[in-house]
Image (cartoon, coloured by chain):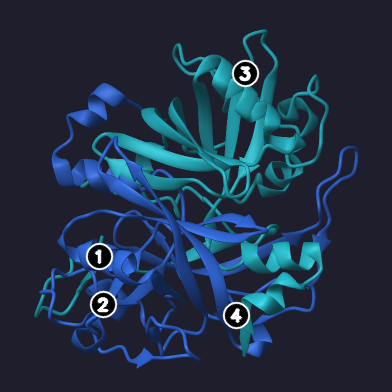
Chain colours: A cyan, B blue
Amino acid sequence: MNITEQEFRSFEERKRARFINSLSGFKSANLVGTKSKSGQTNLCIISSAFHLGANPALMGFVIRPDVTSRHTLDYMRETGFCSLNHVHEEIFERAHQTSARYEQNISEFSACNLEEEYINDFYSPFVKEAHIKIGLQLQREVTINENGTHLLICGIKSVSLPEKCLMEDGYIDIEKAGTVSVSALDTYHKTKKLARLSYAKVNKKVQKIEK
Amino acid sequence: MNITEQEFRSFEERKRARFINSLSGFKSANLVGTKSKSGQTNLCIISSAFHLGANPALMGFVIRPDVTSRHTLDYMRETGFCSLNHVHEEIFERAHQTSARYEQNISEFSACNLEEEYINDFYSPFVKEAHIKIGLQLQREVTINENGTHLLICGIKSVSLPEKCLMEDGYIDIEKAGTVSVSALDTYHKTKKLARLSYAKVNKKVQKIEK
């Protein structure tokens, strides 16, 4: 079936949100941990983190200035830092709960039963239960005037991960770490590897790489 | 284990690329179809598509101006349009092959054994074998000066999908459509739904939604 712009624009608001949120494909599931200058911590689930570049090492994600992620944006502007923590099978329900509209003086860490962890001298709290934890520094903010959202471009400062998940060639086996994926607004999926494929070349069939 | 910026910056280039590309989590796998003004078609796999907003309906993705995606960028600038096609289990190897460095006068559609399809009067070719196909119009280009990449902000113009994948409430069951996910640069995964969760509210435990 084919649905035109005119048709989906007339969908009821929540229905349109679910529909449009499904279109980009499977999304990453990450918890962003921040701490205000005054010491208030915050945790916020996002599904928009994307790879921007390896050299320099950059990641981007989108923050909507609504109540639930407003504090993340404020604290990142205040301090310049956040942590990014992969959501895995055992914490996805608690991670989803962080999207509830908690008051500013309530930390989603304690409200959602996830523990703060500080690694070395990094300012922002990580999620202790997470297996893959990344320290990010805000580099630049791009305002998306079309809808009032904010694209945050961040530099990667540190990576914590289980040693067994790091392959010799640099590949991180995030499936082995239990990292989950999201579709639309609210559906969580685990994964099963189909194949790792060789670097594609003209006139050469891609091969499956056996680990 | 903890890896600092200083440590991963010293990784050999390909190793660093694999490592950093793994960090954002699971990524979407999409084929971008374009056609130049003069009629040359192009197909390019991307893993950076992300949801930007539902009202207006916007999607973003990143194009690196290297040989393999240069033509996509050129044709989008020329014509203002592209198609976005979910990669699924049966075409992921052919989809990966589109990342080889084909000459400009070679269409990845024919070189990679994927068929062009035109839907209604949309300018850009879709991938006939894909199950979920989205017509996009380039709205704005944001240059990421940090690394010379281009973030393309696109409006969603049309959606084609199997009727059985569209739920009444607007949710699209992309797992049922066979859509795959990518980790790092080259690893494809199918998914298995853990749960769909209810809208999170303060002081209320999230519930699993049965379909």
Q: Which residue is mark 1?
A: B74
Q: Name the element at disc 2.
A: loop
**Mark 3 falls within which chain?**
A
Mark found first going from the N terminus, 2 or 1: 2
Q: CA distance from mark 4 to mark 3?
A: 40 Å
In the rendered view, would you say B136 is above or below A182?
below
The quadrant in which residue B49 appears is: bottom left
Q: Is residue A138 left or right of residue B65?
A: right
Q: CA distance from mark 4 to mark 1?
A: 34 Å
Q: Which residue is mark 4?
A: B176
Q: What amino acid is found at the position of numbered circle 3 in the picture? A: Lys
In the rendered view, would you say B191 is above or below A30?
below
In front: label 3 or label 1: 1
Residue at the far top: name it. Answer: A38
Give yes or no for contact between labels 2 and 1 (Cβ–Cβ under 8 Å).
yes
In front: label 4 or label 1: 1
Mark found first going from the N terminus, 4 or 2: 2
In front: label 4 or label 2: 2
Which residue lies at the image location 90% right of the left edge and 44% below the top edge? Answer: B204
Residue A128 showing in the rendered view: no
Q: What amino acid is found at the position of numbered circle 4 in the picture? A: Lys
Give coordinates of residue B123: x percent, y percent. Answer: 40, 82
Q: Nearest the camera: A50 or A196?
A: A50
Label 4 environment density (alpha carbons within 10 Å; few <14, some 14–19, many ≥20)? some
Q: Which residue is mark 2?
A: B36
The quadrant in which residue B63 appears is: bottom left
In front: label 4 or label 3: 3
**Mark 1 falls within which chain?**
B
Q: Which residue is mark 3?
A: A35
Give coordinates of residue A57: x percent, y percent. Answer: 31, 35
Q: What amino acid is found at the position of numbered circle 1 in the picture? A: Asp
